[in-house]
Amino acid sequence: MRVTTVAGPPSVGKTSVVVKTATRFAAQGHKVGIVKFDSLSTTDDRVYQQAGLPVVVGLSGNVCPDHYFVSNIDDCLRWGIAQDYDFLIAESAGLCNRCSPHVQGVQAICVVDNLSGIHTPRKIGPMLKLADVVVITKGDIVSQAEREVFAYNVRLANPRAQIVAFHGITGQGAADLAAHMLTAPSVDTLEGRRLRFSMPSAVCPYCIGETAIGRDHQRGNVRKMCFGEPAR
Amino acid sequence: MTARLFSLTIGELAQRHPAVAEFLAGARALEAKPDIALGDWIDTLDDDQLGHLGMDRDGVASHLDALVGRLDGVRRAAELPLQSLTLQGGVDKAGRLERLDLTLVPGDVACIVGPTGSGKSRLLADIECLAQGDTPSQRRVLVNGRVLDRAERAAFGGRLIAQLSQNMNFVVDLSVGEFVAMHANCRMVSRPDQAVAEVIACANELAGETFGDDVPLTQLSGGQTRALMIADTAVLSSSPVVLIDEIENAGIDRRRALDLLIAREKITLISTHDPILALMGDRRIVIGGGAVVDVIAPSAAEKANLQALGRIDDELAQLRHRLRRGERIDVLPDALFSQ
């Protein structure tokens, strides 16, 4: 089973990208399964169902979404294999822009949009920098010059990635992305594999439900800001 | 990573390209250790700095290696000579086959006409993305008679086609000068400062009210924005194909803008409702219901009419100018009525 993880900031069009590409595979006779990770609630499972794509949803609730993802992704593979899928696509909510649990040896796609600002590619961490394919959406809304500069900045942030321009409404770019996804390695289990980059370490009282503010509650792994003279 | 790259100093490396300098500046390498070799600098990075970069130690080395390789590659990439662009029919909005097999060569100017919503912008978008049956029209666009493979498309690096869409807005929060400089850098223009000054001067020639390089992009008027987009395309772009969508809506001197944009060695496609622009083409592509329904070569009579329309247009421009100065138009010039 070919496995692809898809991550990206909220509202960039991850679901549209996956639906448009996965329905191409389905039309060619492949069996495609979807896992949708989100934090509090999602209605995207309905979008997948309407497109005729089987989907399971994982909601992380009060656990860090990316930690939740990595604790569950191998179970997703077992589910996909039991269902006899040819492709498993796991879409996850990239909420903090820093990490997204790209796994070594598993195809990783990062979705970003042209509207998010020209400097965004350099602000996004390993989610973008360590992806194999970067999909750029909403190119129809900005000028060609902005599109070009945005794609160039993505290239600087991740010189190794393949870049695919994608129009989520028309599906333009789906053929290109499908060609990339056909090269995703087949994977049967993730047992023993590693993340491409460590997740932020945050073991402190707030991780386990503390809500009070104050010095007394800042224990464990705490990092404090430095205040020098303000820059002028 | 190549040993040679490893042994270059931070300062030397920064001079290779602004993007490399920016990476090193972001990592605070440039101010702290310009004389240290890259390899030694990477060895000095602690966990905090690596965390800030979002990479592990090997990652920094391979990132810089890939970055330098990519930039050198783009710089070297000889522009693939364009001999022809071929448009092959897909389907119309009702799903009927489109009868289209049109090849354009450098020097060709083709105008696209048809009612609003008939699919003119779709045709331009198909060309821009080099559609391979993967757009709603299912058209195919061939370069030099064949489908470009992905590697070739990447080698072009998006430089094959320049497009002026109907989009009249910039969304980026930068000044005119900052943005054009950024664009010039990404096009690897040899003298970015000079190019920026040239783009702004050229835009000011097209727009009514002049603007400087320190104005935020988002504060430009519709006409100024369009003028800047046109000047940017004309000056910075070496793309052999230029797509222009309804330039007459821009509120700028459209004939002057076209003079800037149409170069003899390029293929130009212009979607338009304007009779003068439509008759300027060597060919007129007629669109209806989402498909090309005809391709017309202008007649000798049409070419003669183009001259007459040009004179009328000049008269109208004079009237427009007078109105803008607050004058009255009580009498119309005779030239508007003479044959």
Image (cartoon, coloured by chain):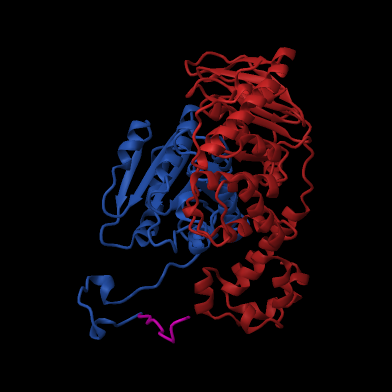
Q: Is residue A127 above or below residue A142?
A: below
Residue A101 among those drawn in magenta: no
Residue A229 among those drawn in magenta: yes
Residue B113 left/right relative to B68: left
Residue at the extreme front of the image, as rendered: B330
Q: In the image, residue B249 lies at what x, y percent?
A: 52, 34
Q: Is residue B315 above or below residue A159?
A: above
- Quadrant of the rendered structure where residue B25 is? bottom right
- Foreground of the two, A74 or B134: B134
- Count of residue discs: 0
Is residue A195 among the parts visible in the rendering?
no
- The residue drawn where x is 61% and y is 35% is B254
Q: In the image, residue A55 lies at what x, y percent?
A: 35, 40
Is residue B282 among the parts visible in the rendering?
yes
- Quadrant of the rendered structure where residue B318 is? top right
Q: Colour of chain B?
A: red
- Foreground of the two, A129 or B166: B166
Q: In the image, residue B185 lies at what x, y percent?
A: 66, 58
Residue B143 left/right relative to B171: right
Q: Which chain is blue?
A: A
- The residue drawn where x is 42% and y is 37% is A19
Q: Which residues are magenta?
A: A222-232
Residue B233 left/right relative to A52: right
SS majority, magenta? loop
Q: In the image, residue B105 lies at what x, y percent?
A: 76, 28
- Foreground of the two, B330 or B101: B330
Q: Is residue A185 above or below residue B131?
A: below
